[in-house]
Amino acid sequence: MADTGHSLTIGVDIGGTKVAAGVVTPGGRILARLRTQTPGRSKSPQIVEDTIVSLVEELRRDFRVRAVGVGAAGFVDERRAEVLFAPHLSWRREPLRDSLALRLGLPVVVENDANASAWAEVRAGAGRGVDDLVVVNLGTGIGGAVVLDGRLRRGRYGLAGEFGHMTVVPGGHLCECGNRGCWEQYASGNALAREARALVLSESPMAGALHQAVGGDARQVTGSLVSELARKGDRMCGELMRDAGEWLGAGLADLAAAFDPELFIVGGGVSEAGDLLLEPAREVFGRYLTGRGYRPEARVVAAALGNEAGLIGAADLAREALPRWHQRRRQRRLGRSGR
């Protein structure tokens, strides 16, 4: 078993389609990683928990770790203990932290996945040296996080940063959260896939590459596929990516009005399209920015850590929480001894 001074933690990143886990050093280096598919929403919360435990236990066979951080795609309470609601998973008021800690015998921190990704970018990625920034992650949906004065801001109830569920089109597309017209219905991987599937189903002559890539089966179309074909030069997928970029830019302008950051970092799988997404986003952002021409304009850049940001950030947040965990444990012991 590798022992590096008991400084290692495990980060787990749970998204709508995948679960990734890795052993991470204090400097953000991943020593080992594992990845599997996310159990579907039809699966019980127990199966998702079993998946996490299985990955962590496999990683622990070769490394001595001190704590586990879990980045979950959902609403996490202010104690970083309970997943209140996960639109793309089966969790509803799930006491994930305590359940995992009991099974693993390790301190566990549960964090919103976008918060975890943002923290990784602050510590080791595109946000180093910046105290005021907003991170927007475009994946299955849209996650977000706010860092002000160098601190991750979670809000009173732990739910800050759920930008994907801001209503941008009243009465618009139905969102999995139960509302209509949410931002993630227009600028996420799911949004790209929905528009592309419609083109395949309509047998549009503009969707030849898409049709060929999925053999005419629209169910196989994903946001990642649209992004890949756009990077390869397919005109229709490039137009879909530009549409998503414009929606992204409009939303960023709203966030600038609210938070006035120095920097926007755009991450998540959809952002891998690079300037195909970011150039239209910057253009529309500049056009819609309140007070444009008379105020400093935040930069809009791609995330630096890619798909690994979530697990790196979750691992670092778990490491940071260790002193508080040890303090609580000492207090509990003192309370028992005083009785």
Image (cartoon, helix red, strand yellow):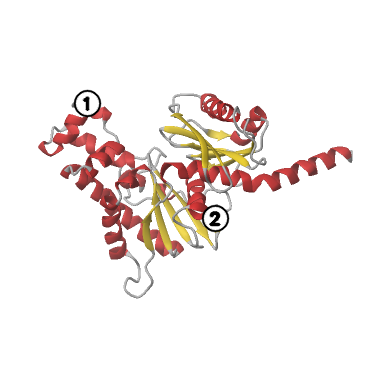
Disc 2 + disc 1, Cβ < 8 Å: no
| Viewer-nearest residue: 167 or 81 | 81
- Residue receiving disc 1: 217
Which type of secondary structure does the marked residue at label 2 adopt? Answer: strand
Q: Residue at x 67, y 45 (%)?
A: 322
Q: Is residue 144 left or right of residue 327?
A: left
Q: Residue at x 44, y 24 (%)?
A: 42
Q: Residue 273 location, x and y as percent?
A: 29, 46
Q: Residues within 10 Å of mark 2 (few under 14, many from 20)?
A: some
Above or below for 204 versus 260: above
Q: Is residue 335 left or right of residue 250?
A: right
Q: Is residue 252 left or right of residue 61?
A: left
Does label 2 or label 1 sit earlier along the sequence? 2
Residue at the extreme left: 205
Q: Residues within 10 Å of mark 1 (few under 14, many from 20)?
A: some
Which type of secondary structure does the marked residue at label 1 adopt? Answer: loop
| Viewer-nearest residue: 322 or 290 | 322
- Residue receiving disc 2: 153
Disc 2 to disc 1, C-alpha distance? 43 Å
Q: Please count the marks in the image.
A: 2
Kind of residue at disc 1: Asp
Q: Residue 36 location, x and y as percent?
A: 45, 28
Q: Residue 230 location, x and y as percent?
A: 22, 43
Q: Residue 226 location, x and y as percent?
A: 25, 39
Above or below for 149 versus 271: below
| Viewer-nearest residue: 197 or 92 | 197
Q: Residue at x 35, y 44 (%)?
A: 180
Kind of residue at disc 2: Arg
Location of the C terminus by quadrant is top right
Residue at the extreme bottom: 294
Q: Which of the numbered marks, if any, corresponds to residue 159?
A: none
